[in-house]
Structures are given as C-alpha cells and as structure tokens.
Amino acid sequence: MSRTISSTVLPIQRAMASANPSAWTDGLVTDASGTEVTIALLTGAPLRLRVVGPAVELVAGEPVAYHPVAELLSASVVTTTARPA
C-alpha cells in the first residue's frame, strides 16, 4: 500500500514533519462533515480541523495522525494539509 501526498502539501511541510517526527499525535475521527473533521486525540483532547485539498473520505472511528507543527493530517493512505478550525 503506497501513501499518497496531496498536492496541497508544501515541501516545507514535509521537511518540518521529517524534522519533528515526535510531534505526530494519534487520534480517532469522531465526526467528519464536509471539509471539517473532529478528532479525539489519544490524550483525550478533542481537535477540530479544516481539511484543505482533495476530499478525503473520513469516517467516524478511523485512526488518523496529526502533525500540528506542519499542519498535516495522515489518514488511511493520504497525507493532506489540515488546519485548526
């Protein structure tokens, strides 16, 4: 299974994610409607994000990872830009 990187992800975002691998935070999607997604982080904190770029079909219960420094959301086989809503 190969990972697809959205065209909205800039080279600087990739570089920041690579330089700060410990910043990735795991969570589960609790709500997905349109371009907005709510994630329950494994720390217990909720996080609402606006997904930028191609539609990513997220469903409740799906595991994801979010990198707040690079503003990246990794879900299933797609990595895309996501900013706090």
Image: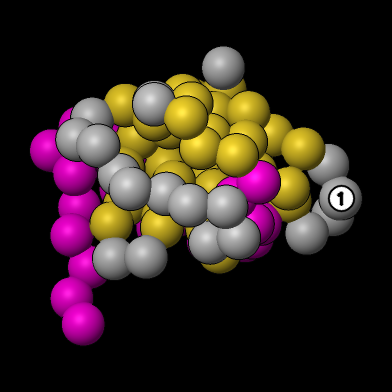
Q: Nearer the viewer, residue 22 or 85?
A: 85
- Residue at the left extreme? 7
Q: Quadrant of the C terminus?
A: top right
Residue 62 visible: yes
Whole-percent x, y for residue 12 in the image: 28, 36
Which amino acid lies under the numbered mark 1 shown in the image of this protein? Gly
Near mark 1 (Cα within 10 A), the count class, few <14, some 14-19 or many ≥20, is few
Rendered position, 36 above or below 26: above
- Residue at the right extreme? 44
- Residue with the mark numbered 1: 44
Whole-percent x, y for residue 78 in the image: 28, 56
Residue 24 visible: no
What residue lies at 42% left-to-right and 42% top-to-bottom?
A: 72
User: Bounds of the magenta span?
Assistant: 1-30
Residue 60 left/right relative to 43: left
Whole-percent x, y for residue 67 in the image: 53, 46
Q: Nearer the viewer, residue 60 or 9?
A: 60
Quadrant in which residue 19 is drawn:
bottom left
What residue lies at 39% left-to-right and 26% top-to-bottom?
A: 34
Residue 5 left/right relative to 72: left
Query: Is 19 within the magenta?
Result: yes
Rendered position, 45 above or below 78: above
Whole-percent x, y for residue 36 in the image: 48, 26
Q: Secondary structure at mark 1?
A: loop
Q: Quadrant of the N terminus?
A: bottom left
